[in-house]
Image: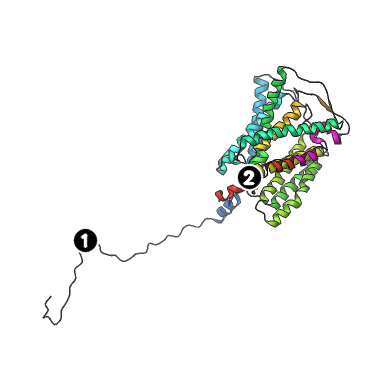
């Protein structure tokens, strides 16, 4: 720079290796193609906020169970008669075992299919609670004890007579073990269907109006297609649930869906028993009421293991140990021999002890004992309710 220069000029040079700053450019965003309205509607119909909608899940489960039972039943019948050349009589342990295995595989297969679709484990369906072994064992003990109490009351009142012992020696253990395995599968089949899959699935998406519609449809089906006094047991259990579930609906309780699902599954449990021979209205109602007790046990213990154990030992004690009718079913190869006496209203008649009026106070006693023994200090959130935030 020349200090004497009257018009000094200053020149600047860019520093070497300095990148040249380019003006900002705007990258155009291409418009995304809009999804067709038909596709959005179909997705809304099939999927809800909690993954696959409950109605579709239940439909798939029932459809696959029915199809598998038909296919497995046809295959088993052909194998037994054409390959093994065996004849299975009604009430025999072999025929009962074959039928129960078919149902067990059908229900298990349907649950496996649904669990894959819903991206869950099989144990997620009300089988993951704490202390499952303890609850299963106490359920086994409770079922035998409560059935024994009912038999004792019938005997004390003169409505049940004991005959001679039907088995002896090795036969006792052989038939006892065979019927034990069979009724354990019964517990898994019926509790796996109603208190595991259906209760869990309905509890995550049902409301009062859907439960009311389902129970109403079952009552309508009984009115149109069923005959006999047994249907009044379905009407009674359906009617008893209307007011409590509606009050839960109005209060918007967080546990309302669980109890509305219990109302629907318990009514359905009684409904399917109308197809059994020899059932009266008390037997149908008691089956549905016991189903509700099992739902209560899920709420209190966190799983269906107590219900599975109770169900298995109750049926085992009734069918094998005491030799009474079980929902009209009389088994071959039972330990003791009993026969009803007096009016069927008190003895149960062809229905067995479950058809006696004495079972109603016993059900209330079971409910009270369940609450007192397994009550929780804090409110329990059912597995189906707890799974909703994770799915969302």
Picture quadrant where residue 342 is located: top right
User: 142 above or below 3?
Assistant: above
Is most of the magenta stretch helix, strand or loop? Answer: helix
* Residue position for label 2: 201
Q: In this view of the protein, can residue 262 be seen by the observer?
A: yes
Relative to the observer, which residue lies in front, 344 or 209? 344
Q: Earlier in the sequence, mark 2 or mark 1?
A: 1
Residue 366 belongs to the span the image colors magenta: yes
Question: Bounds of the magenta span?
Answer: 341-367
Relative to the observer, which residue lies in front, 387 or 131? 131
Relative to the observer, which residue lies in front, 22 or 141? 141
Specify whether 337 is left or right of 95.
right
Asked if labels 1 and 2 touch by Cβ distance under 8 angstroms, the answer is: no
The type of colouring in the image is: rainbow
Question: Residue 354: image x %, image y %?
Answer: 79, 35
Query: Whole-Å distance between the Cαs marked 2 and 1?
Result: 67 Å
Q: Residue at x 73, y 54 (%)?
A: 246
Question: Residue 350: image x %, image y %?
Answer: 82, 31
Residue 89 belongs to the span the image colors magenta: no
Tag shown at residue 17: 1
The residue sitting at the right extreme is 342
Decide: few, some or many residues near mark 2? Use Cα within 10 Å; few <14, some 14-19, many ≥20.
Answer: many
């Amino acid at each position: 720079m020349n200090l004497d220069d009257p018009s000094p000029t200053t020149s600047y040079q860019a520093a070497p290796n300095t990148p040249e700053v380019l003006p900002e450019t705007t990258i155009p965003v291409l418009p995304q193609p809009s999804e067709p309205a038909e596709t959005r509607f179909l997705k809304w119909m099939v999927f809800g906020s909690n993954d696959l909608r409950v109605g579709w899940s239940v439909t798939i489960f029932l459809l696959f169970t029915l199809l598998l039972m038909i296919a497995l039943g046809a295959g088993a019948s052909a194998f037994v008669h054409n390959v093994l050349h065996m004849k299975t009589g009604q009430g025999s342990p072999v025929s009962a075992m074959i039928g129960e295995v078919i149902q067990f595989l059908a229900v298990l297969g349907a649950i496996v299919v649904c669990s894959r679709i819903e991206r869950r484990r099989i144990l997620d369906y009300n089988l993951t609670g704490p202390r499952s072994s303890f609850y299963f064992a106490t359920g086994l003990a409770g079922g035998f004890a409560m059935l024994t109490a009912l038999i004792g009351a019938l005997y004390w009142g003169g409505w049940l007579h004991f005959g001679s012992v039907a088995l002896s020696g090795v036969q006792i253990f052989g038939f006892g073990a065979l019927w034990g395995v069979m009724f354990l599968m019964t517990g898994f089949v019926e509790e796996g269907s109603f208190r595991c899959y259906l209760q869990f699935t309905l509890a995550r998406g049902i409301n009062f109006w859907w439960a009311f519609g389902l129970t109403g449809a079952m009552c309508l089906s009984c009115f149109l297609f069923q005959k006999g006094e047994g249907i009044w047991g379905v009407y009674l259990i359906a009617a008893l649930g209307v007011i409590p579930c509606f009050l839960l609906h109005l209060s918007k309780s967080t546990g309302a869906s669980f109890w509305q699902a219990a109302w629907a599954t318990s009514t359905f449990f009684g409904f399917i028993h109308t197809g059994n021979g020899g059932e009266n209205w008390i037997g149908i109602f008691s089956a549905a009421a016991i189903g509700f007790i099992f739902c209560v046990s899920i709420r209190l213990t966190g799983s269906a293991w107590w219900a599975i154990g109770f169900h298995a030992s109750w049926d085992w004690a009734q069918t094998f140990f005491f030799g009474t009718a079980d929902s009209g079913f009389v088994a071959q190869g039972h330990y003791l021999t009993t026969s009803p006496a007096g009016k069927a209203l008190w003895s149960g008649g062809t229905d067995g002890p479950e058809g006696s009026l004495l079972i109603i106070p016993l059900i209330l006693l079971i409910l009270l004992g369940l609450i007192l023994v397994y009550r929780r200090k804090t409110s329990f959130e059912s597995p189906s309710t707890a799974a909703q935030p994770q799915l969302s």
